Amino acid sequence: MSLKAYFEKNRKRLRKRKRTIVALSVLAVMGLATATYAWFTVNTFVGVQDFELDISTGDDLRVSMDNLGSDISKYTHVITNEMLNSYLRKNYNTTLNDIILDPVTTNDGKNFTYQKGEKVSPNDKESYFEFECYFIASRDMHVYLTKEAADNDGKANGKNDGTSVTTSSPSPQSDVVKACRIDFNATDSSVKTYEPNKGTKVTNLNTFDLPGGSMTYNDSNNLFSLKKLSPKKVTMRLWLEGEDPECDNDIQRANLKVKLSFVGIREGRNTPA
């Protein structure tokens, strides 16, 4: 064999090896990407450490765990953990401390399943958190989720210390806040779903996030509307979306702290009532 033929044969062999190495590398990257879309694989779940609901406007908008009729003075500005525990004991024989969030998924915000399609009921030991409450207003208004909490006089303070989903768990457990969803289902309205740190859409469910800067109130984040002194039942649900890429083993044993702050805006306005 001539020297030229020898080198040509080796060059072809080397090019073939390079193609093989590149192909194997691509397959390895694809395998890693697929692994990030993992549901929990062992049974150590996420606990709800704290859940708080408050109203960011004055006497115009109030809330209660029960339908107390049209007398707005019987309603309050806050729903506390104690109120939620009373509701859970009465209706589910459990408490907030016993609620463990197991990854579930939903395409409509109302019907939930496990990964293999098995239907899930709320407030079981390993499922999702659900409760009902009643909102009432002193005048017709639209209700929004807001990042602006209220001062002592009940007026929105313009600071971003209202709605938040946080955790005291360290990284990578802290990614739990990216996997959670909260939805709001009023009796005569479609489901609206809040996704903190909204990422790529993973189910048919449409979600919204709150802006990082000043709040804006529009149709995209309008939760529901109220008629003057007419209480409205709203069902709220908190869950871990199993299809979210952050819902993997890294976030197990994490805890969640949820604060929901609401504001009422009168018809024709774009600032709180």
Image (tube, grey):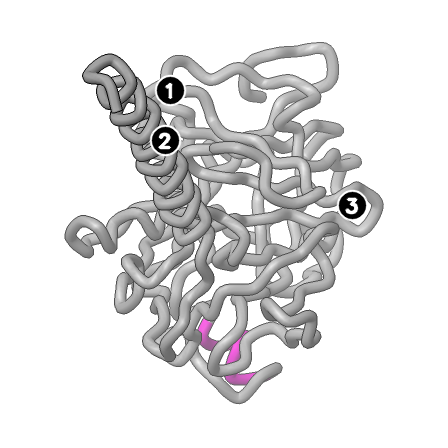
For residue 190, what is the image quadrant?
Answer: top right
Q: Which one is nearer the viewer's eye here, 152 or 50?
A: 50
**Callout 1: 10 Å neighbours few (<14), some, many (20+)?**
few
The residue indicated by pointer 2 is: 16
Q: Is residue 25 left or right of residue 188?
A: left
- Lower sequence index among marks 3 and 2: 2
Whether 195 is drawn above or below 101: the answer is above
Instruction: Tell me the magenta residue range.
Output: 85-90
Q: In this view, does 163 lie to the left or right of 68?
A: left
The residue indicated by pointer 1 is: 212
**Callout 3: 10 Å neighbours few (<14), some, many (20+)?**
some
The amino acid type, in three-letter code, at marker 2 is Lys
The amino acid type, in three-letter code, at marker 3 is Ser
| Foreground label between 3 and 2 | 2
The CA distance from mark 3 to mark 2 is 75 Å
* Residue for point 41% across, 49% down: 31
| Foreground label between 2 and 1 | 2
Q: Are marks 2 and 1 in contact (CB under 8 Å)?
A: no
Dominant secondary-structure state across the stretch colored magenta: helix
**Seen from this angle, which residue lies furthest right?**
188
The quadrant of the image that shows the N terminus is top left
The residue indicated by pointer 3 is: 230
